[in-house]
Amino acid sequence: MNWQLKENVNHFGTQKTVDLKRLMEVIRESTYQGYLSIEALGPGDPFEKVSGFLTRVKAVLQTEGMA
């Protein structure tokens, strides 16, 4: 089993930013102990998008006590 964190999800045809705090709560409750890969799609510089998303993921991991 693995988790893949997406920056945005399709919600009834509309792109919505994923709720990282809630997602980390679900991951913690699942007792998952593997890697969390990330995905950032769409327009824009992929290096900037992934870097920015990784920063957000790390911040939530720290605030949730998972880092």
Image (cartoon, rainbow, N blue to C red):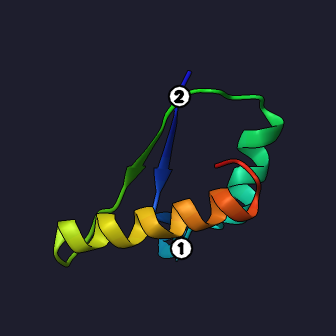
With 36 as the anchor, is 31 left or right in this view?
right
The residue that mark 1 highlights is 17
Contact check, label 1 and label 2, Cβ < 8 Å: no
Identify the element where label 1 is drawn: strand
Q: Nearer the viewer, residue 38 or 12?
A: 38
Dot in front, 1 or 2: 2
With 33 as the anchor, is 26 left or right in this view?
right
Residue placed at 16% from the left, 75% from the top? 45
Query: As displayed, is residue 35 above or below residue 45?
Result: above
The residue that mark 2 highlights is 2
Residue 34: percent from left, percent from top: 56, 27
Query: As displayed, is residue 26 above or below residue 22?
Result: above
Check residue 65 in the rendering and tell me which mark sits there, or answer none.
none
Circle 2 packing at 10 Å, graded few (<14), some (14-19), many (20+), is few
Question: In the picture, which quadrant includes the N terminus?
Answer: top right
Residue 20: percent from left, percent from top: 63, 63
CA separation, marks 1 and 2? 21 Å
Residue placed at 42% from the left, 62% from the top? 54
Which of the 4 image quarters holds residue 64?
bottom right
Amino acid carrying mark 2 in the image: Asn
Residue placed at 70% from the left, 52% from the top? 24
Outermost right residue:
29
Outermost top residue:
1
The mark tally for this picture is: 2
Q: Nearer the viewer, residue 13 or 7?
A: 7
Circle 1 packing at 10 Å, graded few (<14), some (14-19), many (20+), is few
Amino acid carrying mark 1 in the image: Thr
Of label 1 and label 2, which has the lower sequence position? Answer: 2
Which of the 4 image quarters holds residue 52?
bottom left
Identify the element where label 2 is drawn: loop
Residue 35: percent from left, percent from top: 50, 33
